[in-house]
Image (cartoon, grey):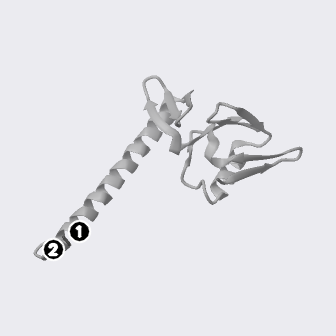
Amino acid sequence: MAKIIFNTRDELIALEADNVAIVQASGNYSHVILMNKREITITMGISKVENALKNSKHTKSTFIRIGRSMIINHSFLQKIDVLKQMITLSDAHDEIRIKVAKKSLKSYKDAVVKSIQIKNNMTKKNNETDNDRNRGEPTVQDN
């Protein structure tokens, strides 16, 4: 597991990146919420926290910024409910529900759907390419 180190003027905080579920902005502070619902306040703005997460080797694609005041760990995503303005994050043991602005939530949902469609199209093209390669060629099976 990769640790993320936050070094501020008065404290040094080391967190397991895999346990971070949400980062919420609160002025010059950031509230880090872990999947076990433990909350840690860091004396660092959300932009600096975002940079620390981006610069970590193991967390580049799992953390997504939603609007101006929130970062979520995309790997815990279970449900997006635009009508209720709610995101549900879950692992095997815990579940966290958090309210998100409707506009930000809709944009995030659209990005997730687009990402899934791109992955499905890539898989479909790869399967078609494999089928084209195998057409007309004898196959050998070991008994």
Q: Position of residue 75 (x, y in %)?
A: 51, 45
Above or below, 105 against 85 in this view is below
Mark 1 to mark 2: distance in Å?
13 Å
Q: Specify whether 127 is left or right of 25.
A: left
Q: Where is residue 118 in the image (x, y as percent from the top left)?
A: 35, 54
Residue extending farthest left: 136
Residue extending farthest top: 84
Q: Position of residue 110 (x, y in %)?
A: 40, 41
Q: Residue 27: in sight, yes or no?
A: no
Name the secondary structure under disc 1: helix
The quarter of the rendered structure image containing the C terminus is bottom left
- Which amino acid type is shown beneath numbered disc 2? Thr
- Which amino acid type is shown beneath numbered disc 1? Asp
Q: What residue is drawn where x is 71% and y is 32%?
A: 39
Q: Residues within 10 Å of mark 2 (few under 14, many from 20)?
A: few
State the residue in front, 141 or 36.
141
Name the secondary structure under disc 2: loop
Mark 1 vs mark 2, foreground winner is 2
Q: What residue is drawn where x is 49% and y is 26%?
A: 85
Check disc 1 and report the residue beneath it: 130
Quadrant of the image occupied by residue 126 = bottom left
Check disc 2 and report the residue beneath it: 139
Q: What residue is drawn where x is 48% and y is 34%?
A: 105
Q: Residues within 10 Å of mark 1 (few under 14, many from 20)?
A: few
Among the two numbered marks 1 and 2 on one chain, the one whose residue lies closer to the N terminus: 1
State the residue in front, 26 or 121.
121
Q: How many marks?
A: 2
Q: Specify whether 22 is left or right of 108.
A: right
